[in-house]
């Protein structure tokens, strides 16, 4: 239930104030925190901070359900969408809280900077992935003392 506020917001529902947990997408107005993301298939990545929400499509060929439409027989069926590699989306929270107007075509300077930052973040993640190693027995014992490893 700790993810409930986040999931409810993503479903456009108002979370109950009594729920345990917090909305992971909510940012404080005075926060300089940036939330980075990469979709599990690796086909999109981006970030959300107090001012912008930026998304870049990294791979061609991904299709998703983007609503519904009525087919020739009058049945409601999924409407599929896709976009090519290199497609970018930029939204400003203050003027567009619903993230409906893509400012990327108008704000090339900001988009270029955001794309560079995403590329740098992805490179950092890849570097960390390549330097992974198993924990030593001492490290594992220390984590167990703190309650982060082992146990049930």
Image: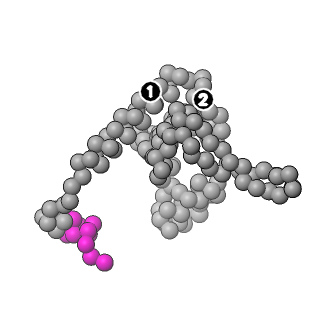
Question: Image height check: is 112 above or below 81?
Answer: above
Which sits in the foreground, 107 or 70?
Answer: 70
Foreground of the two, 30 or 27: 27
Q: Residue at x 49, y 38 (%)?
A: 58
The CA distance from mark 1 to mark 2 is 14 Å
Earlier along the polypeptide chain: callout 1 or callout 2? 2
Q: In the rendered image, which residue does mark 2 sit on?
A: 103
Where's residue 7, x and y in %? 56, 59
Residue at 62 percent of width and 56 percent of height: 11
> Between 79 and 107, which is closer to the camera in this rendering?
79
| Residue at the right extreme of this rendering | 73
Farthest-out residue, left: 138
Tell me if I can see residue 106 in this picture.
yes
Stretch of the chain drawn in magenta: 143-152
The residue lying furthest to the bottom in this view is 152
Q: Main secondary structure of the magenta part?
A: loop
Percent of width and height locating residue 75: 83, 58
Local packing at callout 2 (Cα closer than 10 Å; few below 14, some 14-19, many 20+) is: some
Measuring from the top left, give residue 143's x and y in whole percent. Answer: 21, 65
Does the segment drawn in magenta span residue 15? Answer: no
Above or below, comparing residue 117 to residue 21 in the picture? above
In the image, 131: left or right of 27?
left
User: Measured from the top left, where is residue 13 in percent x and y?
Assistant: 64, 57
Q: Which mark is residue 113?
A: 1
In the image, residue 149 lies in the stretch drawn in magenta: yes
The residue sitting at 45% across, 31% down in the picture is 115
> In terms of secondary structure, where does tag 1 sit?
helix
């Amino acid at each position: 239930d700790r993810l409930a506020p986040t999931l409810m917001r993503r479903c456009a529902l108002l979370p109950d104030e009594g729920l345990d947990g917090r909305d992971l997408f909510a940012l404080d107005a005075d926060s300089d925190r940036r939330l980075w993301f990469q979709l599990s298939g690796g086909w999109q990545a981006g970030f959300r901070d107090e001012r912008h929400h930026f998304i870049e499509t990294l791979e061609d060929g991904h299709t998703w359900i983007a609503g519904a439409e009525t087919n020739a027989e009058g049945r409601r069926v999924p409407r599929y969408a896709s976009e090519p590699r290199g497609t970018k989306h930029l939204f400003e929270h203050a003027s567009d809280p619903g993230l409906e107007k893509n400012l990327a075509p108008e704000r090339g300077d900001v988009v270029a900077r955001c794309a560079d930052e995403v590329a740098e973040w992805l490179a950092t993640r890849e570097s960390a992935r390549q330097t992974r190693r198993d924990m030593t027995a001492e490290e594992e014992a220390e984590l167990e003392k703190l309650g982060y490893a082992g146990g049930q």
